[in-house]
Image (cartoon, rainbow, N blue to C red):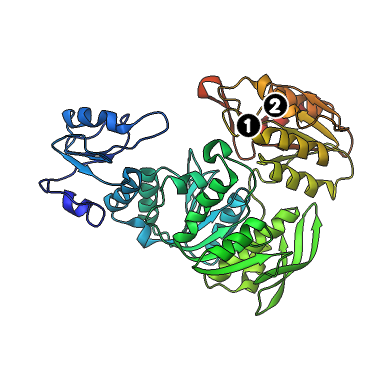
Amino acid sequence: MRLYKLIENIAETNLPDVEITDISSDTRKQLKEGGMFVCIKGNTFDGHDSAEKMLENGAAVVVTERDLGLDRQIIVPDSRRFFTRLCSAWFEHPERELKLVGATGTNGKTTTTTVLKYLLTKLGYKVGLIGTCQNEIGDEIIHTERTTPEAYDLFELFRNMADKGCDYCVMEVSSQGLEQGRVEGCTFETAVFTNLTQDHLDVHGTMENYYQAKKILFSLCKKAVINTDTDYGKRYFDEITCDKISFGERSDADIKASGITISSNGVSYLCNDGKDSFDVSFAMPGDFNVSNSLGVISAMESLGFDGRKTAELLAGFGGVRGRAEVIETGRDFTVICDYAHTPDAIENILSAIRSSAKGRVVCLFGCGGNRDAKKRPLMAKAAAEYADFVIVTSDNPRNEDPDAIISDVLKGIEGSATPYVTIADRKEAIFWSVKNAQKDDVIVLCGKGHEDYQILAGNVKIHFDEREIVAQALSQL
């Protein structure tokens, strides 16, 4: 693609209008001769330090945020956001060929996007999905490394979706992805806010920064769908200026749930959307899944679909992998796998299970290494409050000492009467939970959910599927 066409409306230059053969912001990637390198300053590495070398190695031009005194440089105010728009142009603006639907929030994004894809597919559309568990193009599964892909990967994925005939792309939009401008220039038909609770403070520093990062999404959407049962949701609803719909149980929302029934098999309620009232049944338990399903109905209505028809289709949805997922045991106790990895999420899943459990609720959890350490005792406090027995173990320790992480966690259990054990090795901890299970126990494995790996020291990733480990433990009983 010619240089001037590539940077049209995003940058200006007096350099010759040469053919650009490749684009990259990653020095680890082999840039083709005649490519464009964009210098981005990260937390540990500044791409500007490699600009001259990239030109020597054959780059036609480098893009910088400051004058480096180079002959073939283009200076822009924000190279990270420039790179996102460059990727869009490089792949010929595939996001414009798709109807984008985004979901943001601390918890509930995966359930929301998975159910939306299910519903839109049932209505006859081909749908792409981008999220924490995996990316999808219709029935095709694509591995993912992060919730919101880096800009080049994201727009390449958009292009594949558009070329393969997708009508919609439903995606989880992370706070970090928003803050780093990975969806810069995209326009979402609808954006859903689920909730905001403590997480990622290692990245954002404060809850206010976290809140503001999420808020970016609502400057990129035509319509917003906001959970106003939360204080943060009410604040968003007051502050954002696009068309908006509120949903909730306890608030004076546009779309409301009442007559709520919660069981181990799911939730049911009466939904009133201001035009009609209809029954909703959703096969995922917990009050938080009232909110998730209500948000989905609201999002579908914002896209122009009938709420009653949506509710009829919703009744056929079977669940989300790693979200309140029952692992078959064939025994007189139950094992549930859930992605809960924040204090709020642990409280939600344990309280949902407690409401229908006949026996003890046993919570097994750990906290990730090199991540927000402030939430560790808070997660422990939630586990001790809502479980009858707690097993403290590892999650993804990464480059932190697992025992040091557990020491942080245990500060939240101090003073609690809830019995607990600590077993640093997560596989050993799961074996222990199965071996010591009592009749009618519900063992809740929190934190891994859909993940089939564990990240150890040196960022070494090993295969670790809790479904397989439970099966191994059962075979030894």
Callout 1 crowding tier (Cα within 10 Å): few <14, some 14–19, many ≥20: some
How far apart, in angstroms, are the residues tagged by discs 2 and 1?
8 Å
- Amino acid type, callout 1: Ala
Quadrant for residue 390, please give it: top right
- 455 to the left or right of 97: right
Q: Which residue is mark 1?
A: 373
State which tag comes first along the sequence, 2 or 1: 1
- Does residue 458 lie above or below 354 as drawn? above
> Does residue 432 appear in the picture of this structure?
yes
Vertical position of residue 186 compared to residue 370: above or below: below
Q: Which quadrant of the structure image shows residue 261?
A: bottom right
The residue lying toward the viewer, choosing from 451 and 10, is 10
Find residue 408 and name its label: 2
Note whether residue 100 is visible.
no
Q: Is residue 275 above or below residue 156?
A: below
Q: Is residue 186 above or below residue 416?
A: below
Q: Residue furthest bottom?
A: 275
Q: Quick one: SS at disc 1?
A: helix
Quadrant assignment, res 227: bottom right
The residue located at (65%, 34%) in the rendering is 374
Find out whether the residues at labels 2 and 1 contact each other: C-beta distance under 8 Å: yes
| Residue at 53% across, 41% down | 204
Left or right, 193 with reference to 169: right
Viewer-proximal residue among 267 and 229 = 229
Q: Position of residue 79 (x, y in %)?
A: 31, 43
Q: Position of residue 266 (x, y in %)?
A: 75, 56
Quarter of the figure with the C terminus: top right
